[in-house]
Image (cartoon, grey):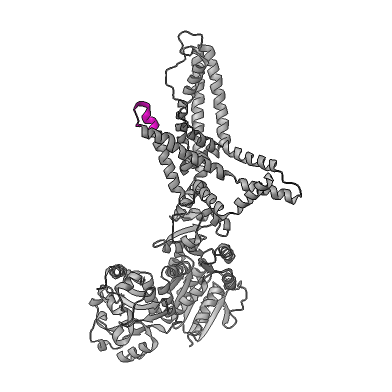
Amino acid sequence: MKKVALVFGYNDYGAQIAKNIVQKYEEVIIFKLDEDEPRNDMQEYKVEGFDLSDEWSSLDNTYDLNECVAFCVIEDDAENIFLTISLRSQFKDLMIIALSSDKESANKLSMAGANKVIPVVQTTAQMISDRLDKPVVTEILHNVLYETSNLKVAEITLEDASYFNGSFPAQVEWELDYNIMLLSVIHKDGNQEFLYSAKERHHPLEDGDSLVVVGYEEDIKFFKKRIGVTK
Amino acid sequence: MFKDWIVDAAYALQTSNRYQRVRKFFYNLLENSSFKYKRYFDMTMVLLIVVSVSVLIREVKFQVPAYIVDLNTYVISFIFFIEYILRFWISSSISKIIIEHKEKDALLDREFNFSLALFHILKEKFRYMISINAIIDLLAVLPFFHQLRLLRIFILFRVFKLFRYTRSVQTFASVLISKKFEFLTLFIFSSIIIFVSSVLIYIMEANNPDSEVKTLYEAFYWSIVTISTVGYGDITPTTTESRFIAMLVITAGVAVLAFTTSLVVSAFTEKLDEIKDLKSIDDLRKLEDFYIICGYEKIAQEVCKNLVKTNKLLILDEEHSRIEQAHKDGFEALNYDPGSVESYKRLHIDMKRQVKAILCLREDDVENVYTTLTVRSFNKDVFILSLLMNDKNRKKLEFAGVNEILYSKELVGLVAREFVGKPVAFEAIHALRSELNNINVEEIIITQRIAQNFTFVEELVHRKYRLLLLGIYKKEHKHFFFNPMGSMILEEGDVLLLIGNVSFIKEFEQHLNKKRKK
């Protein structure tokens, strides 16, 4: 079955999300409520109608929902929360990303079962203050994150940590030997650790650890090859 | 001939840059509270007043050295006299009035009527001379003529000059003036009570040998002392009738006092916001490098919370409820329309010197376009960042002159893409940005001092501070050098991007500034 993105919200948010993720999914399906007005910017996507009281049984039969991601971006918070809880009650493993207008509804969306909540107000405000306070950092990180520069951020999961021979992250000369920088290590247990935090000497690199590195694409490829990562 | 000479002189003065500059300087010094030297002038004048009155008080019982008396009589009086003349000069422009009359007559094709112009000039000057402030100024100068011993008492009028130099007294007076009708009513009521009770007590007590009330003046004095609820007790009513009058006067006195208190309190309550605004505007002049936040809606509220940690902010919003909310949140906020040029004029904001950037954060594109155009109409250079609510309006904002646009819906799209693409990397960068675990990305600008201390990247020893040097942004080349080589030269204006513990980054910055090149 196809890897599909399900966007619930026939609005500007839905249009922007669809535009940004269309290359990462085999199909993007936009779900619209009956009262939504037709839009020109969504004609390239498959649009289906839905109702908040739907049971979603047809979805389960058509798509592999474990591989799908659902975006709940209805602008009305109450409807968005209802939609999220409705999807979660039907599909335990579906990845749900939901939009919230404020912190209060962000909490409710998390309680309703959203895996990730994007608080619009806080995200926008943070971006504005970052741009004013740290313009260079913001621009560089923005370009790195949204891939508009040669620099990339990559997650590399160690398949065979024996290459590092039980070293601690701080003992490896990432910059000198590989021309990459290690931002953080996500250990198998899910704990995130920054290279220069106080804890780094307590945890040597192990199989299954994920390294978040930043560097030029070629250097990252070279590094992966050196440490024997195939994915 | 004489008329022509007068008109020529008026035009010469009106077009003389030097004359106008001098006149403007003295106007600013004496009348313009936003003029930077006025404060020093006011302080000097207050000091002279204090010295002058202190000498007068000292003279009452002690011998004061002659040179101090002379200083008080001649020097200080002379300074006040010069001030009076200057104020008289700037109160109205004679040359301007003459030119106005001349041009008006020329327009109507009639001969220049000098008498009318002169009458107009005299009227303007006389109007100034009979103003309370001018009378006080003149009386304060009179002790100069010290031969007239009585005139020395006019030194006390110098105290009244303090009104000119202290803003709080002016504010207090303006608050009371706002209730002048109520105060007038109260004054008439009290006057009637005082008059009637004085007459009555005089009639009832004047012929009584045991009574202290012998004259109408004493009756009047008793009435005032009683109605004010002071009641010295030096004069007391002796007859039953006059005691009855006393009871009525005391009752009226309580009412008058209560009414007066409530009037003053209500006047202050009503004017409280205005007084606070005046204070804020006054404080604003001293503020530098601050952001003007236009509008205080949800996003603006969050932006303010973030920015206030390291920046100074001023919120402008025409909606009173939102300004109240901003005050509750602890921000400097004024109920002024950011879309009106008049607001900026009244606030005396110097965009070039004081303002870092203007943030148009109304959640309405129409308002943001309007505010941007307003600002651009009088300042082309100030940095403007604006929210965009509907992508269709992007070009309008750009056309209006916004330097940077932030479209929250586009941002949500980008966040969603990154999250589904690289969730772990996304969380890692997000954690870095949001200072979780006290780890942050900071930028340090290479100042001239740092550039003198350190020449090459390898000298920075950032690793000693457990910091990661992500790269250097070369301002000159507008290029970011990731993982820079040790041999890279540091130049003034470069920006170091460092990742690490916030306090270590601060320590490192201090280290950069401390070290001296050997």
Query: Which of the image's four quarters has the C terminus of chain A?
Result: bottom left
* Nearer to the camera, B15 or B351: B15
**Residue B257 appears at what percent x and percent y?**
49, 30
* Nearer to the camera, A137 or B296: A137
Image position of A177 with respect to B341: above or below:
below
**Residue A106 appears at what percent x and percent y?**
45, 67
Q: How many numbered discs sit on the rendered protein? A: 0
Is residue B405 found left or right of B483 in the rendered image? right
Q: Is residue B62 magenta?
A: yes
Image position of B39 with respect to B493: above or below:
above
Image position of B303 with respect to A187: above or below:
above
Which residue is situated farthest in the right direction here?
Answer: B109
Q: Residue at x 57, y 28 (%)?
A: B188
Q: Is residue B177 visible?
A: yes
Magenta segment's dominant SS is helix
Q: Is residue A114 visible?
A: no
Q: Is residue B274 magenta?
A: no
* Nearer to the camera, A167 or B43: B43
Is residue B55 found left or right of B317 in the rendered image? left
**Residue B406 appears at what percent x and percent y?**
51, 71
The image quarter in which residue B517 lies: bottom left
The image quarter in which residue B113 lies: top right
The image quarter in which residue B336 lies: bottom right
Q: Residue at x 72, y 46 (%)?
A: B112
**Residue B390 appears at what percent x and percent y?**
57, 71
* Nearer to the camera, B265 or B11: B11
Q: Which residues are magenta?
A: B55-65
Which residue is situated farthest in the front direction here?
Answer: B1
